Image (cartoon, rainbow, N blue to C red):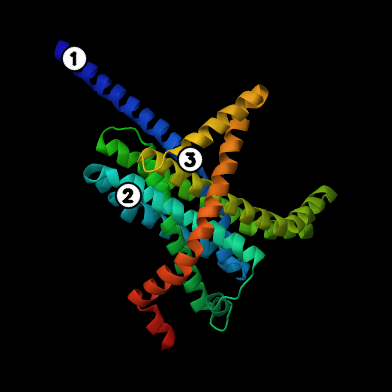
Amino acid sequence: MSGLIALFDDVAAIAKVAATSLDDVATAAAKAGSKAAGVVIDDAAVTPTYVQGFSAERELPMIWRITKGSLRNKLLFLLPVAMALAAFLPQAITPILMLGGAYLCFEGAEKVFHLFWPHASHAIEEDLDVRDPAHLEEAKVAGAIKTDFILSAEIMTITLAAIPPGAVWQQALVLAVVGTGITALVYGSVALIVRADDLGLMMVRQGRLRFTRRLGRTIVAAMPNVLVTLSIVGTVAMLWVGGSIVLHGLETTHLWPWPYEKIHHLSEAAAHAVPAAAGFVGWAVTAVIDGIVGLALGLALLPLATRVIMPLWARISGQKEKAAH
């Protein structure tokens, strides 16, 4: 009997350790997920544009296909790469983060540049050719999954950098939890956004109460502004997060710590000047300066990306030859 009691004690101890470990995983996942919030906002803002112009019946199937592609990106490809980096080349995590941050700055700056200096794009004009809707849908889904891969890589790298040292299985589980949770959050939100106007129309046509019909009309009228606002928020988030990542990387690698330290001092000074809202003011000052730095960096990268990197990549990948044929 004493042996059986001892066995139960051991099982209880193991269960307690397991529960504590799961609590640690949940806590680490929540903290790491919050670090990636800016990229998540951008992901949620960008995705609805991929289903614009398609019939309502095709919107949710397209989003589901993109969701499955996003999960494959995170769990089958990026998670093993992240774990290999953590195990064998941890010093590469910060430079990879900085490259991703620079890409976010470029993407955000390109959108700002296009807003003030609109320019035609042959690729976009080809995308708008709806002579073959099935081909267009395939191209849109493939493009969304490629874009998601870049954003997912940034999310997973940010998450990995935010995870405290621990057991390998814990790190992998945190990455899996964050990756799956963020995917569900982003594409669940996108599904609600793209079908909100249909919900509004249904409320207008079938609503028995005047309030219901009025609410439906309000939803339908508001959706264009909601999509524009999401696009603006996504662009701002890209510049803010990208600038922050690059500046923090320069400080962490000791390549040029001065900008990060200077922004930190300005943030503290602003917070002390408004003690009633010190936390918000400090964060806002940091975010605004990070965004300005991100925009400046992105604009500086535009000529390099459009005139050197992209043509070189097109030549290496054979896209020029495909376009010619």
Badge 2, how many Cα within 10 Å: few under 14, some, many 20+?
Answer: many
Quick one: SS at disc 1?
Answer: helix
| Residue 320 in picture, x, y percent from top left | 40, 81
Residue bearing mark 3: 259
The percent coordinates of residue 304 (x first, y second) are 45, 65
| Residue 220 visible | yes
> Which is nearer the eye, 255 or 284?
255
Q: The residue under label 3 is which amino acid type?
A: Pro
Q: The N terminus is located in which quarter?
A: top left
**Residue, x 63% and y 54% (percent of image)?**
232
Quarter of the view holding residue 314: bottom left
Identify the residue at image location x=67%, y=53%. Answer: 229
Residue found farthest to the top: 2
| Mark 2 element type | helix
Q: Mark 2 points at which residue?
A: 79
Image-quadrant location for residue 111: bottom right
Of 214 and 272, the residue lying toward us: 272
Disc 1 residue type (three-letter): Ala
Q: Can residue 208 be seen in this view?
A: no
Q: Is residue 312 above or below residue 90?
A: below
The residue depicted at 39 percent of the width and 48 percent of the height is 97
Q: In the figure, 216 relative to 146: above or below?
A: above
How many residues crowd mark 1 within 10 Å: few (<14), some (14–19), many (20+)?
Answer: few
* Residue ID for mark 1: 6
**Position of the C terminus by quadrant:** bottom left
**Element at badge 3?**
helix
Q: Where is residue 241 in the image (x, y as percent from the top left)?
A: 51, 46
Measuring from the top left, give residue 194's x and y in whole percent.
62, 59
- Give, as a three-letter code, the residue at label 2: Leu
Mark 3 Cα shell of 10 Å, populated few (<14), some (14-19), many (≥20)? some
The answer to which of marks 2 and 1 sits earlier in the sequence is: 1
